[in-house]
Amino acid sequence: MKKKKNEFFERLMKGMQEGIQHLRGEIQLRTYVLESPDPPPALKPQDIVHLRQRFKMTQDMFGRVINVSTKTVQSWEQGERRPSQASLRLLQIMAEKPDVVCEVVGIRNSVNGAKH
């Protein structure tokens, strides 16, 4: 355990020293430019219904899987409310990579029957 603490401290000190050197203009640090991802696709109420039905889930179960209330799912499906950008991203992942969501939440993927 002590060895890990020493390694962590050494990496932390090195990072601090490099940060100070960079501020002084003594060294140039590597930088990375990340491209901005595309926004999640907008979903119509019927798209959400179809996605939920694709997984053979009730509104309650669907809500629990994506961590929203049943009332929220109902309001999305009825067009009373729209999902947030975060919810749209999760719905996108669920539509495109259902195994990922199912594995993380520990449920059976009813689309292909695989248990994760």
Image (cartoon, rainbow, N blue to C red):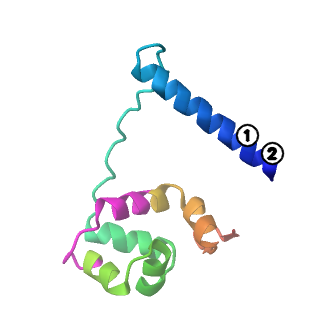
* Whether label 2 touches label 1, CB < 8 Å: yes
Q: Nearer the viewer, residue 66 or 98?
A: 66
Q: In the displayed image of the protein, which residue is found farthest to the top?
A: 26
Foreground residue among 72 and 4: 4
State whether residue 31 appears in this view.
no
Q: CA distance from mark 2 to mark 1?
A: 6 Å
Q: Which mark is residue 7?
A: 1
In percent of width and height, residue 105 lies at: 58, 71
Q: Quadrant of residue 85?
A: bottom left
Residue 34 position in % (x across, y down): 41, 32
The residue singled out by tag 2 in the image is 3
Residue 13 at x, y = what percent?
A: 60, 34
Residue depicted at 73% across the width and 48% down the height: 5
The residue shown at (68%, 43%) is 8
Residue that appears at 47% across and 26% down: 20
Question: In the figure, 55 relative to 16: above or below?
Answer: below
Instruction: Residue lying at the far left in this picture: please name it.
Output: 80
Does 81 lie within the magenta span? yes
Is 113 a magenta residue?
Answer: no
* Residue type pointed to by label 2: Lys
Instruction: Tally the marks.
Output: 2
Residue extent of the magenta highlight: 77-92
- Tag 1 secondary structure: helix
The quadrant in which the C terminus is found is: bottom right
Q: What SS does tag 2 mark?
A: helix
